[in-house]
Amino acid sequence: MTIKIAVIGVGTIAQEHIKAYQANPGAEVVALCDIDIERVKQRGEQFGVARVTGDRAEILSDSEIDAVSICVPNNKHAEIAEDALRAGKNVLLEKPMSVSVAEAEALVKATKETGKSLQIGYVRRYAPNALVAKRFLDEDEFGKIYAARTTILRNAGNPGGWFGDKDVAGGGPLIDLGVHVVDLCWYLMGQPKAVSVSGASFNPIGARDNIQHLSRYRASSETRVNNVEDYATAQIRFEGGAILNVDVSYSLHTRNETAVQLFGEKGGVEIEPALHMVTERHDTVLHIEPQIDSLGFDFTVGFANEIEHFLSVCRGEIAADAPAEHGLEMARMLTAIYESASTGSEVKITH
Ligand SMILES: NC(=O)c1ccc[n+]([C@@H]2O[C@H](COP(=O)([O-])OP(=O)(O)OC[C@H]3O[C@@H](n4cnc5c(N)ncnc54)[C@H](O)[C@@H]3O)[C@@H](O)[C@H]2O)c1
């Protein structure tokens, strides 16, 4: 059974979705949609997709299309995803699922009312390093996980365009980068309920467009607003007492750094920058290096696995494992961190 796919929003990251679908025998990309007509025509030529449009209603009303990948700026995620679900499509929605708790609640409601699936594009969950860590955690190799820490620090990593505009992006590196690694920790910790957060954010440096000879990820749009945080740091407390520390930046005077680490009673596991396990046996500390093709985050394999998972969901074989409920818990955490950063006080999370 071939799942017929349309991709809505065909800027930078959409290319990874299209490539992964086109490499998968279970999918056919039948249409591309973008409000930028020149861009959607160009992508149509680039990927050999004949049907291109600027009108998403045309896509959503076509009963031949089974599912959509949504790769538009963050403030349009919830609106377009809800339209797609209500039009009877399964949805793969890029992260962050929403820019507010209210939008996230609306998406949970829409999946329940339509019976259609929403899968959030948390691609890091599907990379082999995370899959191996999950298997070991599921087998209780590390005991109860009581703490985690994660960072994505970039010294000059503001992607520009709409990413710097708070009204469109919903925030800066916390909602853009932090969402990936907070999710990865939270998912691997067993998806505990968040009870409170304490956060801070700073923006003394700005977008650093002056920096030369250093490449970075770039959005497709040219907007030059920059009113998001350069750097955010937070501590999230969970039911049962576990804690997660997160540090993320677009602009910071630092070496670039990515880390995802979980600490348990019997052992610890580091997923990024490279899969690594630490434990103790017979009064000796052991470092364990799994032998897999890529110990770091393998972007291409991650996308291939994410797309294969979504196609299995579309075929009705499995339930989405990053459903709207996971996006709602994330929206609660991130919204509370931004609130705490602006008030300077701890924020309690209610469910
Ligand atoms: N999973 C990842 O690793 C990853 C990486 C980068 C970006 N993303 C996410 O993907 C999404 C897109 O990011 P990007 O970097 O590709 O941005 P981009 O600016 O390159 O592309 C966005 C595209 O959406 C189009 N668009 C805007 N409004 C639209 C609408 N109403 N209908 C149809 N098209 C519309 C724009 O014209 C543009 O072509 C964001 O939510 C971002 O957070 C995820």
Image: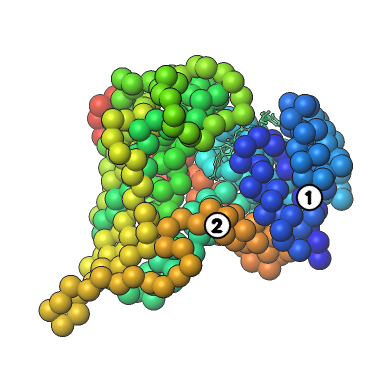
State the image coordinates of residue 290 (x, y, percent, origin top left): 38, 72
Front residue (pair 306, 298)? 298
Cα–Cα span, label 2 and label 1: 19 Å
Asked whether disc 2 touches disc 1, contact meaning CB atoms under 8 Å apart, the reply is: no
Residue drawn at 38 percent across, 20 percent down = 206
Front residue (pair 220, 293)? 293
The amino acid type, in three-letter code, at marker 2 is: Gly
Residue drawn at 37 percent across, 59 percent down = 274
Residue drawn at 44 percent across, 32 percent down = 214
Front residue (pair 255, 140)? 255
SS at circle 2: helix
Judge from the rendering whether residue 59 lies leftward or rightward of residue 344; answer left or right. right
SS at circle 1: strand
Q: Circle 1 sits on which residue?
A: 29
Judge from the rendering whether residue 44 lies leftward or rightward of residue 224; answer left or right. right
Q: Circle 2 sits on which residue?
A: 302
Of the residues under marks 2 and 1, which one precedes in the sequence? 1
Residue 243, which numbered label?
none
Residue 139 vertical placement versus 115 (above, below) = below
